Image (spheres, coloured by chain):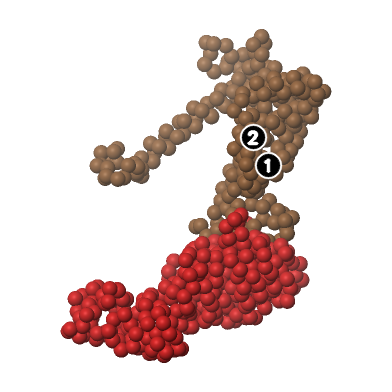
């Protein structure tokens, strides 16, 4: 702890970490990670394979793979998984397609009511999902969109759009105007600029937004439940059914929760690889 | 080659560009020089096609281009910020314009190889822009313009993002390249040294107007306007009374010989290096400050209520402040043409 004992020179408020501090910091970070991520996962896994786990026992008395087998062979869950996958893919694509032009307008075109539009875009993020769901549920019922996959997709887009628009607006704002001028003076028309310059430069933003939208949609419960259930069952809807207070099937719920985790894990591995490059800063003279 | 006729630009009621007419010959390197806000960027944007002129016409290589969008003009631009496409390698950056213009594949290859070679980039062709230094990025930006073989190349202060040393070496490279490529070039800058070193002709702008144009030597030695004289190097504006081919200075001394006849009161832009100082004990002129700059020495001399800037060669004995001096003017001098409209802004 010599670093703390040493007098801190004036004007240098930031504490410098030394080589000796490293194990300590590593210990802290890994402990936090363990407590917040690994421990719950471990417990969940134990629940999913436990064959009876009642209070006096610290670890389950016996283990069984029965539930995994049951869930994986259960056609309802398989169907729910497929529904979830389908809904999430469509929601992600539709979100991207709707968000891009909106973000373009927000980033590039000065117009008078911009602040107001911004608030409208963010509104679904500020208002609790359940409130939105109840309101929209009522509306969809009268429009005949309730209890249908298209209704679920629409209501989920309401939730994923704000984040995507924000992300794409930031990405598009980061594309220097001069890059577009340069492309045009080199002979690219509006379409050429879009295909060869703007879209490729949007890829990191689109991926980030797309991944987050996908995860958000895959795990979405409130709105899906109110608009779609019981006709449309996604994985989270199934999960909550196992968690209802009367039957409380924790082992089954754990298995479904693991299934919910899979796409998120895959996605964050991809994200980690793709999002590392900071394309924008390069090429504009900033090193 | 390039013919700009009475181009103006109005933003609402305010006029950013008063009628500007310029013509540039094929292969000429012309610089638009002026302080920020003088209208040079507005003119550049109009030439590029990003902004439409309020009136006037532009012809390039016999074709009227002002109604055309940027992509339909035969103009390539080198930006201050380089504006390289960050997701493309050097080679792809160079090939972008050729691909857009559907140039034949073999021809593309040939032109890219040639541009890479003359810009000294062949070894870097596979690199991404972020892997290049500032100077290298600027050379890529240049090569990307050269590869297009445009009728006109525009430069928007391309060297101002670089540090002083690199700027000098790239300036020399640019001049050299222009000699090799021979493209008609229009270079915009606020740096008078850059303008003087590179240009065949300089167009001085101020307050949305062209003040005057001419070769670097003419503009420096025989400026018509005080603004030009002041913007291109140091100068002393001295009021004189002209009579035929002679002009009397506000202090006692021999009259100055003029390049052309004039009568009445006028102003003269006296370059600091055109004034000669001699030690003279009872002279009214007094050295008030001395700044040693190495190759030369800058003196301020107080005479007749004015403060004259005078430079002397660094090899001469240095005059200390307080020294009394006699002032002599070398050679023929030139009177300014006064015109309020260009001086006001």
Q: Which residue is under mark 2?
A: A121
Q: Check the image and name the residue furthest to the front.
A: B264
Give the percent coordinates (x, y) of residue B163. Answer: 44, 66
Q: Position of residue B130 (x, y in %)?
A: 55, 59
Which residue is found at the position 52% from the left and 81% from the top? B215
Which residue shows up at 27% across the image and 44% down it?
A10
| Residue extending furthest toward the top | A246
Q: CA distance from mark 2 to mark 1?
A: 10 Å
Q: Nearer the viewer, residue B260 or B139?
A: B260
* Residue picked out by circle 1: A102
- Residue A250 versus residue B59 in the image, above or below: above
Q: Chain of mark 1?
A: A
Q: Secondary structure at mark 2?
A: helix
Q: Are marks 2 and 1 on the same chain?
A: yes
| Observer able to see residue B93 | no
Q: Which chain is red?
A: B
Chain for numbered disc 2: A
Residue B266 appears at what percent x and percent y? 41, 79
Circle 1 sits in a helix, a strand or a loop, which is it?
Answer: helix
The colour chain A appears in is: brown
Callout 2: few (<14), some (14-19), or many (20+) C-alpha neighbours within 10 Å? some
Q: Is residue A87 visible?
A: yes
Q: Quadrant of the N terminus of chain A?
A: top left
**Mark 2 or mark 1, earlier in chain:** 1
Residue farthest to the right, as pictured: A144
Q: Are marks 2 and 1 in contact (CB under 8 Å)?
A: yes
Q: Position of residue A223 (x, y in %)?
A: 69, 24
Relative to B8, residue B306 above or below:
below
Which of the pair B110/B264 is nearer the observer?
B264
The residue located at (41%, 75%) in the rendering is: B233
């Amino acid at each position: 702890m010599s670093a703390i004992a040493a007098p801190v020179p004036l004007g240098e408020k930031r504490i410098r970490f030394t080589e000796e501090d490293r194990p300590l910091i590593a210990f802290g970070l890994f402990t936090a990670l363990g407590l917040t991520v690994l421990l719950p996962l471990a417990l969940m896994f134990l629940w999913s394979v436990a064959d009876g786990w009642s209070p006096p026992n610290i670890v389950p008395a016996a283990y069984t793979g029965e539930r995994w087998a049951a869930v994986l062979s259960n056609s309802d869950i398989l169907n729910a998984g497929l529904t979830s996958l389908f809904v999430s893919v469509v929601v992600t694509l539709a979100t991207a397609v709707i968000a891009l032009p909106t973000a373009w307008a927000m980033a590039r075109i000065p117009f008078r009511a911009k602040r107001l539009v911004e608030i409208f875009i963010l509104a679904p993020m500020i208002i609790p999902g359940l409130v939105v769901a109840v309101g929209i549920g009522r509306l969809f019922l009268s429009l005949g969109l309730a209890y249908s996959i298209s209704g679920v997709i629409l209501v989920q887009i309401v939730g994923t759009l704000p984040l995507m628009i924000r992300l794409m607006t930031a990405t598009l704002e980061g594309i220097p105007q001069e890059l577009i001028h340069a492309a045009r003076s080199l002979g690219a028309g509006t379409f050429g600029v879009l295909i060869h310059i703007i879209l490729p430069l949007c890829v990191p933003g689109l991926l980030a937004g797309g991944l987050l939208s996908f995860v958000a949609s895959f795990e979405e419960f409130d709105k899906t439940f109110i608009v779609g259930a019981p006709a449309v069952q996604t994985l989270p809807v199934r999960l909550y059914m196992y968690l209802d207070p009367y039957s409380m099937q924790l082992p089954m719920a754990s298995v479904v929760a693991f299934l919910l985790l899979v796409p998120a894990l895959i996605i964050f591995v991809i994200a980690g690889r793709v999002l590392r490059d900071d394309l924008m800063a390069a090429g504009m003279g900033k090193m | 080659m390039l013919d700009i006729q009475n181009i103006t630009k109005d933003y609402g009621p305010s006029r950013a560009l008063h009628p500007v007419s310029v013509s540039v010959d094929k292969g000429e390197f012309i610089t638009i020089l002026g302080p920020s806000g003088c209208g040079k960027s507005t003119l550049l944007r109009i030439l590029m096609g990003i902004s439409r002129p309020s009136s006037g016409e532009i012809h390039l290589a016999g074709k009227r281009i002002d109604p055309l969008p940027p992509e339909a003009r035969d103009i390539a631009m080198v930006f201050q910020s380089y504006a390289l496409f960050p997701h493309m390698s050097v080679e792809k950056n160079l090939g972008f314009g050729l691909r857009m213009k559907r140039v034949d594949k073999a021809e593309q290859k040939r032109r890219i190889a040639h541009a890479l070679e003359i810009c000294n980039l062949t070894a870097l062709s596979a690199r991404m822009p972020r892997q290049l230094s500032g100077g290298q990025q600027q050379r890529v930006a240049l090569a990307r313009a050269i590869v297009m073989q445009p009728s006109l190349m525009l430069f928007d202060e391309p060297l101002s993002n670089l540090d002083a040393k690199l700027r000098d070496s790239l300036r020399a490279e640019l001049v050299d390249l222009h000699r090799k490529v021979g493209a008609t070039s229009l270079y915009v800058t606020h740096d008078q040294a850059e303008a003087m070193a590179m240009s065949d002709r300089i167009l001085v702008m101020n307050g949305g107007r062209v003040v005057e144009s001419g070769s670097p030597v003419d503009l420096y030695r025989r400026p018509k306007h005080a603004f030009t004289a002041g913007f291109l190097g140091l100068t002393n504006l001295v009021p004189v009374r002209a009579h035929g081919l002679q002009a009397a200075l506000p202090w006692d001394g021999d009259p100055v010989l003029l390049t052309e006849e004039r009568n009445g009161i006028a102003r003269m832009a006296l370059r600091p290096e055109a004034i000669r100082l001699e030690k003279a004990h009872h002279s009214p002129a007094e050295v008030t400050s001395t700044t040693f700059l190495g190759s030369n020495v800058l003196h301020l001399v107080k005479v007749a209520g004015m403060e004259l800037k005078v430079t002397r060669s660094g090899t001469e004995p240095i005059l200390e402040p307080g020294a009394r001096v006699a002032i002599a003017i070398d050679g023929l001098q030139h009177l300014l043409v006064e015109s309020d409209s260009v001086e006001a802004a």
